[in-house]
Amino acid sequence: MKNISLFLGLSVLFGSFAIPGYSQIQIGGLLRDEFALGLTPPIKSAGMGGAYVAVDRTQSYNPAALSVVEQLEAGLTYGIYDLDEGPTTHRGRLDAIAPVPYLGGGARIMLDGFASDGEGETLLPGDLPVEFDSTTLGLQYGRNITDWLAVGFGGYPYETAHIDLITPGGTIEGQAISQVGSIQLGTILRPHEKINVGGQFIYIRDDLEVDFPAGGGESGDYFNIHYFALGVAVMPFEGTLVAVDYWNGEIEGHVDTSTNFDQDIDRWNFGIEQRVHEKVYLRAGSDNGGLTAGFTVRFNDSIDLDYAFINEELGDKADVFGETQFHGVALIYRF
């Protein structure tokens, strides 16, 4: 079983297709596990190892964390994935968060997209180049049940991922489209004012379609991912946050009976956030064994500038992309 660290953390659709001359080439989404929106943490969380499951703030992607929302918030995010092998990839995301009148709690709408900067050679057999893009719309809602218990729900009504694998015999095109039933469930318990315990479940189900070149025809079936996650967040001192998450799950799917894929998932995230000034927060952590760092500069009560760096992002896909570095920035506005 291979260690993989989340986040939101991402999300590569780990498909395996039998291609003449190659055995079990990983193609499919390359987009539906470590790149997926529901698994990729916001920039604040990314700087502290991607740990967010028990964090009771809008920097968490546990929908139960929206239970504490009291004002409108908008976020604009840009990230770049610098792959050793493969095309440079750009990512953009827009978040809008608001309290929910009458029902209580808060809601979030997310629009996320990323695309490779043209095609680039990978570590796949034959150094095959790839080119890919993806678009996702996400919705979340969370509310308090009691002072010590919050619950939340997330849905992803539109997710599509597309990849071209360029082979000597032509381009193989793969596309994954999310189906009804892709959901996210979360809860946060507050047994003490300085301790939170969180849980989360994510299930993603896709229709998978592949077009083969040179009269190879079409094939397709399904792909699904599910994760259970547990997290603990501790606030031992004023301005200090320590968080750790554990994720366990499975990725499975096939295009035909000869290309079954089934992988167990085992992930850890750890991080710390420290306020060093009234307007400055520093962060550090570990994401799948790769070190992370980040900061927030709070210009005033309304505007934050966030930055995160991950030195070994997409660690689970090192056999395709080699080592990946990630840089991300976000502008947050509260009103």
Image (spheres, rainbow, N blue to C red):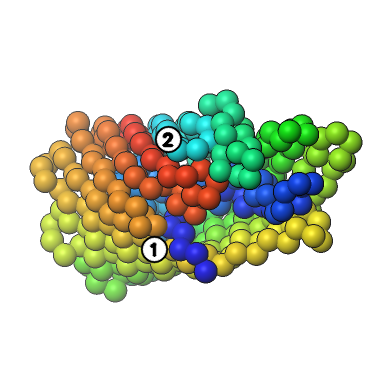
Q: Identify the residue at image location x=48%, y=31%.
A: 88
* Residue 292 in sight: yes
The amino acid type of the residue labelled 2 equals Asp
- Secondary structure of the residue carrying tag 1 is strand
Q: Quadrant of the C terminus?
A: top left
Residue 322 versus residue 202 in the image, above or below? above
Residue reaching furthest bottom? 191
* In-front residue for pair 301/86: 86
* Residue 58 in sight: no
Q: Identify the residue at image location x=43%, y=57%.
A: 5
* In-front residue for pair 195/50: 50
Q: Identify the residue at image location x=26%, y=46%.
A: 293
- Which residue position holds label 2? 82
Marks 2/1: CA distance?
Answer: 23 Å
Disc 2 crowd rating (10 Å Cα; few below 14, some 14-19, many 20+) is some
Disc 1 crowd rating (10 Å Cα; few below 14, some 14-19, many 20+) is many
The amino acid type of the residue labelled 1 equals Trp
- Which residue position holds label 1? 268
Left or right side of 60 for 33:
right
Residue 9 versus residue 126 in the image, above or below? below
Q: Nearer the viewer, mark 2 or mark 1?
A: 2
* In-front residue for pair 273/29: 29
Q: Position of residue 297 (x, y in %)?
A: 21, 35
- Secondary structure of the residue carrying tag 2 is strand
Q: Identify the residue at image location x=73%, y=61%.
A: 260
